[in-house]
Image (spheres, coloured by chain):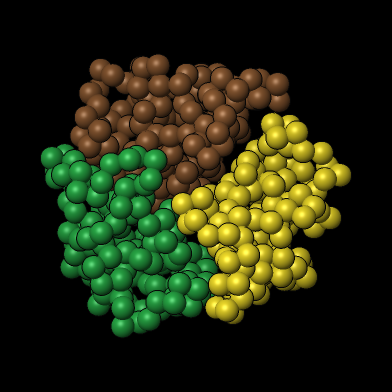
Chain colours: A green, B yellow, C brown
Amino acid sequence: MGKKRKSMAIMVHSGTVDKLLPVLTLASTASTMDVETRLFFTFWALNALKKGGLENVKPPDFLRIGTDTMKEKMRKAGIPSLQKLLQMCKESGNVKIYACSATMELMDIKEEELIPEVDGIVGAATFMDIALDADVSLFI
Amino acid sequence: MGKKRKSMAIMVHSGTVDKLLPVLTLASTASTMDVETRLFFTFWALNALKKGGLENVKPPDFLRIGTDTMKEKMRKAGIPSLQKLLQMCKESGNVKIYACSATMELMDIKEEELIPEVDGIVGAATFMDIALDADVSLFI
Amino acid sequence: MGKKRKSMAIMVHSGTVDKLLPVLTLASTASTMDVETRLFFTFWALNALKKGGLENVKPPDFLRIGTDTMKEKMRKAGIPSLQKLLQMCKESGNVKIYACSATMELMDIKEEELIPEVDGIVGAATFMDIALDADVSLFI
């Protein structure tokens, strides 16, 4: 009998690049290790799933640098862009992206505004189900 | 022999509504799934456990909207208030609320200032004990 | 056959005292409970691993108090300083400190700028490996 695959669940809450970068770095790294990864986007993070959203993710206010400066720093350090990381996640087939239904109500976001990489719109009970069986659960 | 009940431990650190809403939503959702949940309030989150605190939890500074506007948005989206969510947690019997003893010293908060929903004042070792045996542990 | 030791993995992301205090409190508490703890410092947290960094960790902007005031509050509450907590972690032999290699590139930090308490410079795959086998994983 085969060993159960390892899995990770992340509740993604923050909408700034310093938080979304670790989220997508962990997810893409996990995907290369054949870890089943489920990302549940809620609150500010949901803006990154809107069409054009990921390209415009900002650094946090306290950093006082612009989005383009941050992108340039990442490029120079050899770090893939958020869009590239998301693409790597999806191509692996090991990462599912979920949008939080309650946040969509709260922020008045419609399903047709979301990028096609989103695998589904789900509630907190779905996240709980996934997290309870995951080897790693994080809130970022 | 019965299967061990699933459990969740959350270290609750943030004091703003965008973080306390996921905390209490996860806890109340877990409670309906018969998951034993332990919330350990520390730092800024402890203000929410003071009498009158939960009613006055603010949106984060960067949002630049008031507490009443946020409450109205939540009401329109059909999201229960933080007080209602806490009540649901407690009525389920599956959620315990702890206050961090070191934070009470640091912020000079007295036991009599806390709401009666608090089940105990405990230290970091108690959180560690709970988290090491939990199926899900989060820091929010 | 002996029982496997319990373990904890923390991805340390924040660079302010309100977040680094729980990180080092949990790590030092865990170390006294013989829990193997691995701290993976990334992003803002990496500044705390630079020589002189831990002494100058600031309170978050929204608090609007200075570093010295925060230190004095901690001292009065009987809470050890961040430096003392790190020392307790290292003396226990149960805590390893890692610096994130990608962040070092991004922030242009050189290995010789780091304090000697750092056990190694590693990538996200190392964190994933550790977290997948840990009893508790947190992002702080």
Q: Nearer the viewer, residue C58 or C34?
A: C58
Instruction: Say left or right for C80 vs A56.
Output: right
**Residue at image location 25% in from the left, 27% down from the top:** C109
Question: In the rendered view, would you say B99 is above or below A30?
Answer: above
In this view of the protein, which residue sits in the foreground, C9 or A59?
A: A59
Nearer-the-camera pick, B35 or B4: B35
Question: Residue B95: horizontal and vertical position, in percent?
Answer: 71, 62
Q: Please give left or right for residue A11 compared with residue B41 in the image.
A: left
Q: How many marks?
A: 0
Identified at 52% across, 68% down, the residue is A128
Q: Is residue A78 left or right of residue B126?
A: left
Indicate the position of residue A131 as horizontal and vertical percent values.
48, 64
**Horizontal side of residue A103 vs A33, given as left or right:** right
Could you tell me which residue is drawn at 60 percent across and 23 percent down?
Answer: C69
Judge whether C93 appears above or below C102 on screen. Answer: above
Residue A119 image-quadrant placement: bottom left
**Residue at the (24%, 50%) spot, across then down:** A67
Residue B10 in the image: state x and y as whole percent.
59, 53
Residue C1, position in %: x, y?
Answer: 52, 42
Quadrant of the image occupied by residue A82: bottom left
Residue farthest along the right direction in this orientation? B112
**Residue B4 in sight here:** no
Residue A35 visible:
yes
